[in-house]
Image (cartoon, rainbow, N blue to C red):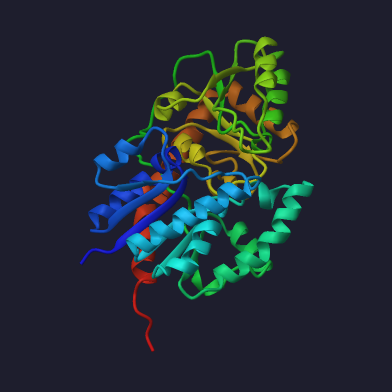
Amino acid sequence: MSKRLVYVVSEDWAFITHRLSLAKHAIEKRYEVIAVTNINDHGKNLSDIGIDVININFSRSFKKPFLDLVSLYKLIRVLQRYKPDIVHNVGVKISLLSSLAGLFSKPKVIINAYTGLGYVFSSNSKLAKIIRFLLIPILRFLNSRTNTWTVFQNENDKLLFIKNKLIETSRTKIIKGSGVNTNEFPYMKEPEEPIIVMLASRLLWDKGIGEFVETASELKSKHPEVKFVLVGDIDQQNPMSLETDTLNDWVKEGVIEWWGHKQNMSKILGLSHIITLPSYREGLPKVLLEAASIGRPIVTTNVPGCRDIVRDNVNGFLVDAKESSGLIEAIDKLILNKELRLRMGLAGREIILNELSSKKINEQFIKLYRKSTRPLKL
């Protein structure tokens, strides 16, 4: 008899990019899969592969409590209707809402997968501190329930939760992200010059966008032929989002190119020579997995999540966060040395194949599903 598995994800595009491979694998393993998400463009795509799709317009911001209450009510109704064996939540806020819904609908198992601790845990702004103060006792209670498991993408996030007594350590697991499909992101030879240094992410200040632009401005004087490219869109719901006017000003000054949101990331990343992500903190950034898979050297920060993908001086360079001098030096070194770029790219591909392919990650989640639903021995 198949088990019923409900994924709760804030946006359908995030489900497509980060969880679709796992959902397909779960279907192959005879799970009945339901996706609860905000449907924009991909509902039919999910339905076509055998996933039941439920639309809830989640707000990713903590600034709209009324909308959150509406989402909570709808989520309770969905879980009561489907009576799932497993509810797999993705992200801090979704995990909070879905775990609260679980108090009323009583799914057999709840898996809260934290893809990074985001604005609430990484920012020291007054708003973030207030939200954090309010959330901690709620998370502590919800995560202490015997049917709840917590998945982290890196050791640092797990240790932060342990330090704040937010989890039962015996029901935790580290699974490094969602992996990358090595067939969809095959090794690609470096394209012809001019060299392109690319940063692909949501356009948030805490992704290191400011440091990237400082680096571009500095290196443009030395390497005027090199292109510095931002790929991604602004995120209106995130308080750390850049403004469109700021981006347009940088483009007008000739410091960067802004390509906006792109769908075919394998093709887009393949146009690059160097990938960078000078982020302040991550869960496990998928773009760096994809960059390593296609064989690009990476310059990123020595912070949780990023350093779980990049080995310093092996498949890229690790630099200090929130400053541009190390970023400038590392990118300059790669611009000047094609042999180094190729060697690091090949090393990155091997790391992905051996440790971080979606196939390996999917199997780890299936093992957790089986373990968490196994009857307790008395």
Locate residue 160 relative to residue 80 in the image: left or right.
Answer: right
Question: Residue sitting at 49 percent across and 41 percent down?
Answer: 286
Q: Residue at x 64, y 34 (%)?
A: 204
Count of residue discs: 0
User: Which residue appears farthest toward the left when viewing the image?
Assistant: 1
Of the 4 image quadrants, the one containing the C terminus is: bottom left
At 56% from the left and 45% from the top, the residue drawn is 311
Residue 109 is drawn in which quadrant? bottom left
Spot occupied by residue 82 in the image (x, y as percentages of width and height): 33, 60
Q: Residue at x 64, y 14 (%)?
A: 251
Query: Is 235 located above or below residue 49 in the figure?
Result: above
Q: Is residue 343 above or below residue 164?
A: above
Residue 229 found in image quarter: top right
**Residue 124 appears in the picture as rendered:** no
Q: Residue furthest right?
A: 126
Observer-nearest residue: 212 or 163?
Answer: 163
Residue 133 seen in render: yes
Q: Is residue 327 above or below residue 93?
A: above
Q: Quadrant of the N terminus?
A: bottom left
In the image, farthest residue toward the bottom = 378
Q: Position of residue 331 (x, y in %)?
A: 63, 27
Q: Position of residue 234 (x, y in %)?
A: 59, 29
Of residue 210 and residue 294, the one placed in the foreground of this image is 210
Residue 320's spot in the image, x, y percent?
71, 41
- Left or right of 15? Residue 254 is right
